[in-house]
Image (cartoon, grey):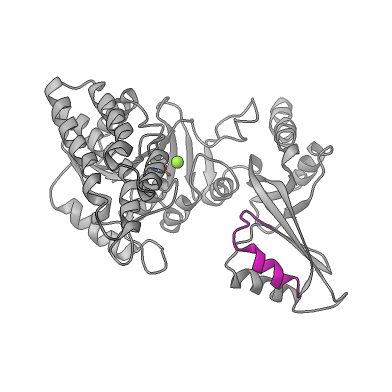
Amino acid sequence: MLVMKFGGTSVGSPEKLEIVASLVSEVTDDRIVVLSAMSGVTNYLYEMADKIEQGADVLEATLPILEKFEKTIFALAIGQDEKEKLWLNVKSRILAINEWVNEPNKKQVRQKIITFGETLSCLIVVGILINRGENVRYIPAINFMRLDSNGEPDYFYIQERIQDEIAKSSNDIIITEGFVCKTYDGLIGNLERGGSDYTASIIGRCLMASEVQIWTDIDGMHNNDPRFVEKTFPIENLSFEEAAELAYFGAKVLHPTCILPVQLVNVPVRIKNTGDPLAKGTLISHKTQGNGIKAVAAKDGIHILKIKSFRMLMAYGFVEKVFSVFSKYQVPIDVITTSEVSISVTIDNLENTDELIDELSDLGEVSLTSGHSLICVVGNFIADSHGHANKIFSSLKNVPLRMISYGSSDHNVTLLIDTVHKNEALNALNLVCFEEASLIC
Ligand code: ASP
Ligand code: MG
């Protein structure tokens, strides 16, 4: 079984929806196709949910969605009768929002609205595929995708339900929504923004898929951020660890949650470009290939909290006390550096930090600075290899470094800089680590 997930830009127009249908048709393996909402639709649905909560007229709030989908369907390359039929179906589903809003549970109304974009994508792609004579079936994600009481995927339940669903009839192609799930108590929920990648990965794990393909608008994970650096290139192979670091620390191509489910059962992930299907893309697997620096990513909006102990040298228990405060307020830490008397940590969210800082102030002198970016250099830096840090630091000789983390894994070096220097840092790293390196080769 192959899992093929298409993101918002891959289903973003009538032409692209046709391309998705073609890519799905061309494959001969049994496949389960996971779809995102068309790009921009989820954002609009969030706005729509806000408007409806604030008492806006529901029909009026729904109009832009009705118009968008009518236009999309009538621009498809399918017969006029099929278009009419598909439009009637989609229209009646959109109009049903009018009834949802009468539900007493307003949080449910919101969840139903924001997760609706993926269902609309499914209906359209199923319509195109049926028109092409494919043996296709839509299985709503809420029939199998469920979270447990900790908000984690309920793998046992999902596996059983998805296998049951697939066994109900023999279809070559199954289409389902990304992002959508049920919560532990059986209500509609979601897997967080960008969570369709996660859906694909959870399904890949539960079905022990041959591969999870993430189809997007770029030909793989690149060695650097193409929004800031001109000469970037796709990386053909990455290990799960390397890809997870890159995804977590800034690479937008893949949602960071997507790695772990498949990594645990060794199902590979392939990133493919819907606009250039023949491009190799990036294969993420358990294999680590080659040594040295492979990629650079950056994450903005980072804050540094520095806690300087009141007690001086040889105090013990300080680290434990500091971390227990973070744990108490459930504030996740990304990077940590320590000296004999102080600890610096980075966080990417200031929500709920007033009380945290108050409590940390009992342990030491606390300072908080913002406006930082985290630069993550990923690769294979096995213990006895050398020269990588030198390359990184020499390329950044003109950039003030706030924090450095090296050696906690064989796969990354993390540096904290002020965001104003990010562009310069990414380009300098590209020049020294990739462009000059390739000239030497
Ligand atoms: N449509 C959802 C979002 O925009 C989920 C996804 O596309 O992955 O966040
Ligand atoms: Mg995405």
* Relative image position of residue 169 (x, y in whole percent): 12, 48
* Relative image position of residue 431 (x, y in whole percent): 73, 30
Left or right of 135? Residue 441 is right
* Relative image position of residue 179 (x, y in whole percent): 37, 49
Q: Quadrant of residue 321?
A: bottom right
| Position of 325 relative to 375 (above/below) | below
Q: Quadrant of residue 410?
A: bottom right
Q: Quadrant of ligand 1?
A: top left
In-front residue for pair 331/217: 331
Q: What residue is drawn where x is 27% and y is 60%?
A: 104
Q: What residue is drawn where x is 27% and y is 32%?
A: 66
In-front residue for pair 352/400: 352
Left or right of 35? Residue 297 is right
Magenta residues?
346-362
Q: What residue is drawn where x is 43% and y is 52%?
A: 192
* Relative image position of residue 322 (x, y in whole percent): 70, 72
Q: Can residue 33 be spotted in the picture?
A: no
| Position of 286 relative to 272 (above/below) | below
Q: Quadrant of residue 342?
A: bottom right
In-front residue for pair 286/15: 15
Is 374 colored magenta in this rendering? Answer: no
